[in-house]
Amino acid sequence: IWRFTASNTPRTFFAAIQGACAYTRFFLPSCLPRSICMPNQTPLNLTGFAVSLLLVFRTNQSYDRWWEARKVWGTILNRVRDITTQAAVFIPEDEPRLREGIRNWAIAFTRTLEAHLQGKLVERDLKSNLENTLSPYELDMVMNSQHKVVKCCSVLAELALQAPINSIERQMLQHNVQVFYDTLGMCERIMRTPLPLTYTRHSSRFLFVYINALPFAMYSAFGWGCIPITIMISALLLGIDEIGVQIEEPFGVLPLDAICTRAEIDMRSIIKEQPDLAEYVRGLRSGSAATARTVPAEVAEVR
């Protein structure tokens, strides 16, 4: 219970069951003095509120961390779409490699950030995820960098600086790069600042003592029925605590791979469809037959 994690949940649960059985079997009033039971439930009534308060606070704090992480990744998804659209619109058509370069390094930013936050869980897959996006030389640049995410942001900043666009358009591109740096810092703050260890330990120990006191308080009223009741209450309380443990580290729970895949699909689609969109708008402005909207006959008569 001192190091309560998802991996030892079954052991913790069955330990509570064994504890309840042991209390009922060996601490029966017929075997030990009747005073071993808890005739007055005031101690549990007084501490029950504290247990509830601790569990609710723990769960709320963990949820706040999870929700903040999800909002940050929502911002990342929006910004990578935006910078790709800006590259497709601002950069001249005779610079297709520069357009694709900004798109590719924006994709690399999302993938390297995912690997940075999930560590060894996806680090081994990073190279295979980027093989179809970056050239071998660019891939070596990323893999040999001390901080892969910062490297991607630096390349994007340099691409924006050297792009043949005006100062206002360049500023808009650089603003998105700055947002990338900001979201990186937000993610690292969440990742490197867990809930205080003293609070986590005290909550677990408090819950452990409370659960172990339940059979004493309920035996006089329920007899052997205190066993299933204790098991049920323990499962509910430990389940609430487990929810907080699970979402306390949000980057292991959020579907980051699905978000990155969605972003990559959208960015590739933006660059691919831009020539057709540009041709459509040019035709719309010139009033060509291919794009001109047909005016209904009744409207034409009114005109």
Image (cartoon, helix red, strand yellow):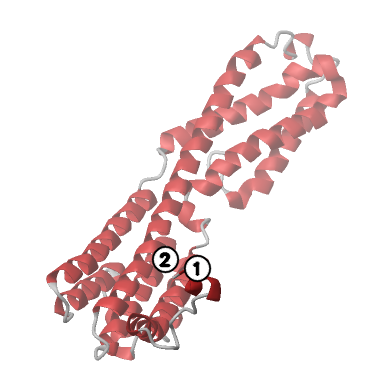
- Residue 114: numbered disc: 2
- Residue 148: numbered disc: none
The residue closer to the viewer here, 122 or 298, is: 298
The residue closer to the viewer here, 154 or 195, is: 154
Q: How many marks?
A: 2
Seen in the image, is 226 located left or right of residue 87? right
Residue at coordinates 73% horizontally, 17% vertically from top-left?
217
What kind of residue is marked 1? Asp
What kind of residue is marked 2? Glu
Task: Please provide percent x and percent y for residue 142.
Answer: 30, 78
Task: Please provide percent x and percent y for residue 149.
Answer: 30, 68
Q: Are marks 1 and 2 in contact (CB under 8 Å)?
A: yes
Residue at coordinates 27% horizontally, 68% vertically from top-left?
147
Residue 142: in sight, yes or no? Answer: no
Residue at coordinates 40% horizontally, 71% vertically from top-left?
111
Element at badge 2? helix
The relative height of residue 151 versus residue 238 in the rendered view (above or below) is: below
Mark earlier in primary sequence (1, 2) = 2
Whole-angstrom CA distance, mark 1 to mark 2, is 7 Å
Task: Please provide percent x and percent y for residue 269.
Answer: 44, 79
Residue at coordinates 13% horizontally, 70% vertically from top-left?
167
Quadrant of the drawing holding the N terminus: top right
Give the residue at mark 1: 257
